[in-house]
Amino acid sequence: EDQVTQSPEALRLQEGESSSLNCSYTVSGLRGLFWYRQDPGKGPEFLFTLYSAGEEKEKERLKATLTKKESFLHITAPKPEDSATYLCAVPYSSASKIIFGSGTRLSIRP
Amino acid sequence: NAGVTQTPKFQVLKTGQSMTLQCAQDMNHNSMYWYRQDPGMGLRLIYYSASEGTTDKGEVPNGYNVSRLNKREFSLRLESAAPSQTSVYFCASSDLPLGVLEQYFGPGTRLTVT
């Protein structure tokens, strides 16, 4: 069964404490993996697209990486404004199927 | 440039009532989508429109209908609302069809069915 699983469900860090979020997937034909950020009461905001294993993308304190089975979102020296829910999404070979993970709620304490 | 807009922002319905959620985008995107988001379940695709004049079912289409009115607008209709349809609904758009490029999301409609 096609699945996208994110871990942990919630993560609380101190400001400046680096960590990683995980998105693992099972797929029959990966066409890409997307990372989004969602603030409370708002719609998801696009962060990165990764298309092949070994690819990396960076934006400010965030770096996304991709392997054949999972993706990591690394957060370096986070600030309170990085607090949000981070979602990953994987489109499958079926044209009508795109699966979002349930997200990781990240909280950064000052 | 407003991006993706949705109306209304909040709505309370009684079981059996009908309503239409409106969505518009000003990015000249070809593809548009409707999702619902429930706690602990992530975003689930209800319907999508790969291009003007076409619509297709997503993962959870039962109880919903859609209309791609023109390239800018994509509406979602609940004909007879049920409590199970209480959710937050997001509209999104992208330049190319599902999964090829990133999607841009609206602010959401919070729907409660009593």
Image (cartoon, coloured by chain):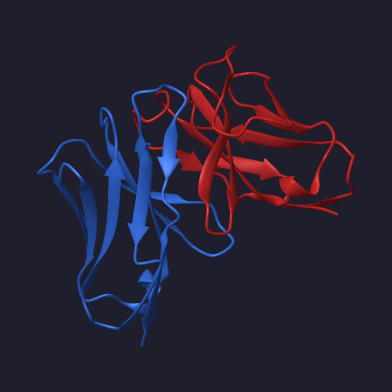
Chain colours: A blue, B red
How many circles with numbers are drawn on the protein?
0
Residue located farthest toward the left when viewing the structure as drawn: A54
Most extreme residue toward the front, as rendered? A1
| Residue A61 higher or lower than B107, as above or below | below
On the image, the x and y values in percent for residue A30 come to 26, 32
As drawn, the residue found furthest toward the top would be: B53
Residue for point 51% across, 16% down: B51
At 37% across and 31% down in the image, what residue appears?
Answer: B99
Whether residue A80 is situated above or below residue B114 in the rendered picture: below
Q: Residue A15 occupies which quadrant of the picture?
A: bottom left
Question: Which residue is found at the position 42% from the left and 58% from the top?
Answer: A103
Q: Position of residue B28 (x, y in %)?
A: 49, 25
Q: Residue at x 49, y 20 (%)?
A: B50
Q: Quadrant of residue B15?
A: top right
Question: With respect to residue B70, does A74 lie above or below?
Answer: below
Tell me if residue A102 can be seen.
Answer: yes
Estimate the x, y position of residue A91 in percent, counting from the top left: 36, 33
| Image-quadrant location for residue A81 | bottom left
Is residue B1 visible from the viewing direction of this image?
A: no
Q: Is residue A48 left or right of residue B17?
A: left
Quadrant that contains the N terminus of chain A: top left
> What is the quadrant of the C terminus of chain A in the image?
bottom left
A22 relative to A40 in the view: left or right: left
